[in-house]
Image (spheres, rainbow, N blue to C red):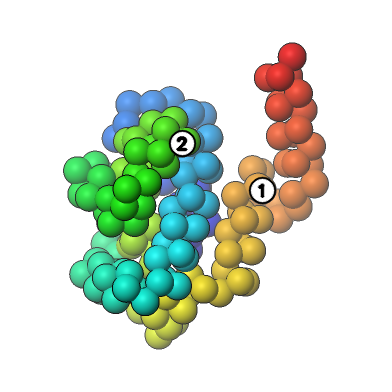
Amino acid sequence: MMTDLLKDQAIEAISKKTGLDLESSKSMASKALPMLLGALKNNSADDSKKESLEKAVAKNDGSILDNLDNINLNDGSKILGHIFGDKKEQAEKEVGDSSVLAALAPMVMGALWKANSTSGSSASDLLSSDWMIAKLAISFLDKDWDWDIKDDLMWMAMNFMKWKS
């Protein structure tokens, strides 16, 4: 479900909300999703933050994923504050545009709610799953969605070399 957040419809919604072109939106969302999931995973492992995470996921009904036009950047920014805490600005700088993170945050929470409701596992359990994190890492690296990352890693290396020159 999380991998769907980087599919065309979600990227188009992010682009529309942020005013960025599709390629920039996809590139930034590809950076943002692993950051969000990593921060959520860290929060799920911290007993003092775990309960807050579970309450936040329970409040969400996942409907944002059915109507991406309803993404609210202000709500997303609030979610980011809870997820990243005092590292929110650093995360926004790393992605390159705070609005991309703010648009993606409600989608991630919606996806967690849906995964939680269909699997019966808590959000913390879902986030602690190494299989899930590995699958998300592959989906992050797999730009052409063929579940083979060798060609994508080569493409990234070539683009990095062009950028460095």
Query: Is there any visible trace of residue 70 in the rendered image?
Result: no
Residue 138, image x, y percentages: 66, 55
> What is the quadrant of the C terminus in the image?
top right
SS at mark 2 in the image: helix
How packed mark 2 is, by other alpha carbons closer than 10 Å (few <14, some 14-19, many 20 or more), is some
Q: Which mark is residue 61?
A: none
34 or 152: nearer the eye? 34
**Relative to residue 146, is residue 21 drawn left or right?**
left
* Extreme residue toward the top, this view: 165
Q: Is residue 72 above or below residue 2?
A: above
Look at 68% across and 19% down and name the residue there: 163
**What amino acid is found at the position of numbered circle 2 in the picture?**
Val
Q: Is residue 152 above or below residue 16?
A: below
Residue 2, image x, y percentages: 48, 59
Look at 79% across and 37% down and name the residue there: 154
Mark 2–mark 1 CB contact (< 8 Å): no
Query: Is there any visible trace of residue 163 in the rendered image?
Result: yes
How far is mark 2 from mark 1, CA to CA? 18 Å
Place residue 144 in its image quadrant: top right
The residue that mark 1 highlights is 142
SS at mark 1 in the image: loop
**Relative to residue 103, is residue 115 drawn left or right?**
right
Counting residues from the start of the chain, the first of labels 2 and 1 encountered is 2
153 or 39: nearer the eye? 39
How packed mark 1 is, by other alpha carbons closer than 10 Å (few <14, some 14-19, many 20 or more), is some
Look at 39% across and 26% down and name the residue there: 20
* Extreme residue toward the bottom, this view: 120
Residue 25, image x, y percentages: 45, 33
Look at 71% across and 26% down and name the residue there: 159
**What amino acid is found at the position of numbered circle 1 in the picture?**
Asp
**Relative to residue 153, is residue 74 drawn left or right?**
left
The residue that mark 2 highlights is 95
